[in-house]
């Protein structure tokens, strides 16, 4: 059996794959339902501020188009700019930076380096090594990739983990002939395993992402004391283990891949790897440049004080630029003409659109409005308060972003429980743990945005992500309440 040759097409075409054919009437229906939902929010007789109506309407519109795909996923990503410019309910200048955010730079730079892999066949070599290392059983593949992403996300932001791991998964899938992730259950499952793994492991340490840093700052301002790294790990470990174990079990049984085993035996993959021969010099450069960028992302705390602006996105960009400067036998190992034809431009605009939507919901007051609806029900304290704030955070995490959710709900939790004469620290910890768990939409977290950009089935992500969110909400709410009741140290730093 001969496996498909890697390198003829751009990597997984992500958001650059044309929208699959639909019947004319179906596409027209789906096209008009999106703006129809937006207009309905503007016209319904409800006493809701105009900016909030626009925010909720835009959320419904973009969600519908992302799920039904009447237009390209990236086209939907431009809606925040169009709607804000037309209706002026939030300043366009507040949204525009989302389309040139540092994380967009990270994705672009990582894409340049994986394009270099493809140029010289390193993606094929990496795919074969992955298949030999993890095994050919698809369920095992799902579990192992989830665990690796989960472990890495404890010390790296989830977007960085997703941006570095998903290209490897995609290279492996392409090697076995899976190009269209949307229509592949095993392809979608493997990529979502990485994306969800980054969310499940993110709360383990303060390094897991921006939501954690927001909590650190809020707690230090509240207590006037430093929130130590070790203290964070101890306090959050029960919540982190609950989320990680529950999600591990979920991904193990939630997906039913169409194939039980990756085509080809271990012996076949060893033979294919041997046929590639020794690594060429350009391959070594491709691996070295990608590894160097990843190392600097890991080692950020070691040089942050010396180069405060040299964050991981710019470390990746530096090595991406080097891809065009390094020469082999008198020729650059990567040219812009080759790279730009392979770049996944749709991924960048899809990701930017999700970030912009989160900014719209925050700037328009939509996030605070939704929070204010639930806060009065939490004023009795106890399990009801834990449930209300957990529900609020989970809803916001899935619809805006985990960073925005924590940025909104943590201050509200602190002010609410201080006014009731209750210690807000346990509630802050619970909110932060739930806030890390974005599974449903491209807006939910960096991991889901990258996964969506690579073309996973968004219907699958929505349905199974909603089930996962409900499960995690129940478990973390219950475990958090029990910790607050029976572990006095849980309310201290």
Image: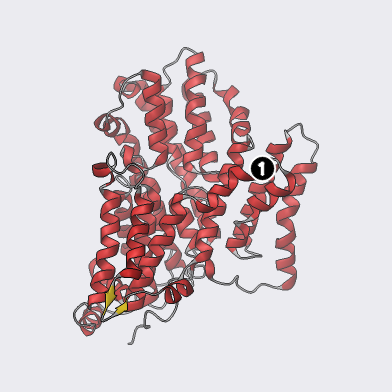
Position of residue 281 in the picture relative to residue 242 (left or right) = left
Q: How many marks?
A: 1
Give the percent coordinates (x, y) of residue 149: 33, 54
Closer-to-camera residue (346/148): 346
Mark 1 crowdedness (10 Å alpha carbons): few <14, some 14-19, many ≥20: many
Q: Which part of the image, by quadrant, shows the N terminus?
A: bottom left
Residue lying at the far bottom in this picture: please name it: 1
Give the percent coordinates (x, y) of residue 50: 73, 37
Q: Residue at x 37, y 50 (%)?
A: 198
Q: Which part of the image, by quadrant, shows the C terminus?
A: top left
Residue lying at the far front in this picture: please name it: 330
Q: Residue at x 51, y 44 (%)?
A: 401
Q: How was the colour assigned to the protein in this rendering?
A: secondary structure
Closer-to-camera residue (209/322): 322
* Observer able to see residue 67: yes
Give the percent coordinates (x, y) of residue 65: 64, 58
Mark 1, secondary structure of its residue = helix
Give the percent coordinates (x, y) of residue 247: 38, 48
Dot 1 corresponds to which residue? Answer: 56
Position of residue 456 in the picture relative to residue 145 (left or right) = right
On the image, which quarter does residue 114 sit in? bottom left
Q: Residue at x 73, y 54 (%)?
A: 35
Establish if 4 lies above or below 390: below
* Observer able to see residue 260: no
On the image, which quarter does residue 374 sit in? top right
Establish if 113 lies above or below 316: below
Closer-to-camera residue (154/157): 157
Q: Residue at x 51, y 50 (%)?
A: 440
């Amino acid at each position: 059996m001969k496996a498909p040759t890697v390198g003829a097409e751009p990597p997984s075409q992500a958001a650059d794959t044309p929208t699959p054919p639909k019947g004319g009437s179906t596409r027209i229906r789906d096209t008009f339902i999106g703006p129809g939902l937006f207009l309905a929010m503007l016209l319904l007789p409800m006493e809701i501020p105009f900016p909030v109506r626009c925010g909720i309407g835009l959320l419904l519109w973009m969600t519908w188009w992302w799920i039904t795909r009447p237009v390209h996923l990236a086209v939907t990503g431009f809606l925040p700019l169009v709607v804000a410019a037309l209706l002026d309910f939030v300043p366009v200048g507040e949204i525009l930076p989302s389309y040139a955010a540092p994380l967009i730079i990270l994705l672009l730079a990582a894409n340049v380096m994986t394009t270099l892999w493809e140029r010289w066949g390193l993606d094929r070599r990496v795919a074969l090594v992955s298949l030999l290392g993890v095994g050919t059983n698809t369920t095992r593949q799902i579990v192992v990739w989830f665990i690796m992403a989960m472990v890495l996300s404890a010390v790296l932001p989830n977007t960085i983990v997703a941006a570095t791991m998903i290209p490897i998964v995609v290279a492996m899938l392409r090697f076995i002939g899976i190009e269209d992730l949307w229509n592949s259950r095993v392809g979608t499952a493997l990529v979502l395993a990485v994306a969800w793994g980054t969310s499940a492991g993110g709360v383990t340490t303060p390094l897991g992402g921006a939501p954690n840093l927001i909590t650190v700052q809020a707690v230090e301002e509240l207590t006037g004391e430093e929130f130590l790294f070790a203290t964070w790990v101890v306090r959050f470990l029960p919540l982190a283990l609950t989320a990680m174990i529950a999600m591990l079990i979920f991904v193990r049984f939630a997906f039913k891949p169409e194939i039980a085993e990756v085509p080809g035996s271990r012996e076949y993959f060893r033979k294919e790897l041997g046929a590639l021969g020794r690594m060429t010099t350009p391959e070594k450069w491709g691996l070295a440049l990608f590894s160097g960028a990843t190392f600097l992302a890991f080692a950020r705390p070691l040089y942050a004080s010396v180069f405060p602006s040299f964050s991981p996105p710019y470390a990746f960009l530096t090595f991406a630029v080097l891809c065009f400067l390094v020469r082999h036998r008198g020729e650059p190992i990567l040219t812009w003409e080759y790279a730009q034809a392979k770049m996944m431009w749709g991924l960048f605009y899809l990701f930017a659109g999700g970030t912009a939507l989160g900014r719209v919901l925050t700037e328009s007051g939509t996030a605070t409005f939704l929070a204010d609806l639930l806060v009065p029900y939490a004023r009795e304290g106890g399990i009801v308060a834990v449930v209300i704030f957990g529900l609020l955070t989970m809803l916001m995490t899935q619809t805006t972003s985990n960073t925005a959710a924590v940025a909104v709900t943590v201050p509200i939790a602190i002010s609410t429980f201080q006014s009731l004469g209750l210690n807000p620290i346990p509630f802050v910890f619970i909110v932060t743990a739930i806030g890390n768990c974005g599974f449903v939409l491209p807006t939910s977290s960096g991991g889901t945005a990258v996964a969506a950009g690579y073309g996973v089935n968004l219907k699958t992500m929505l349905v199974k992500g909603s089930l996962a969110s409900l499960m995690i909400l129940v478990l973390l709410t219950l475990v958090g309440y029990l910790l607050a009741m029976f572990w006095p140290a849980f309310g201290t730093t």
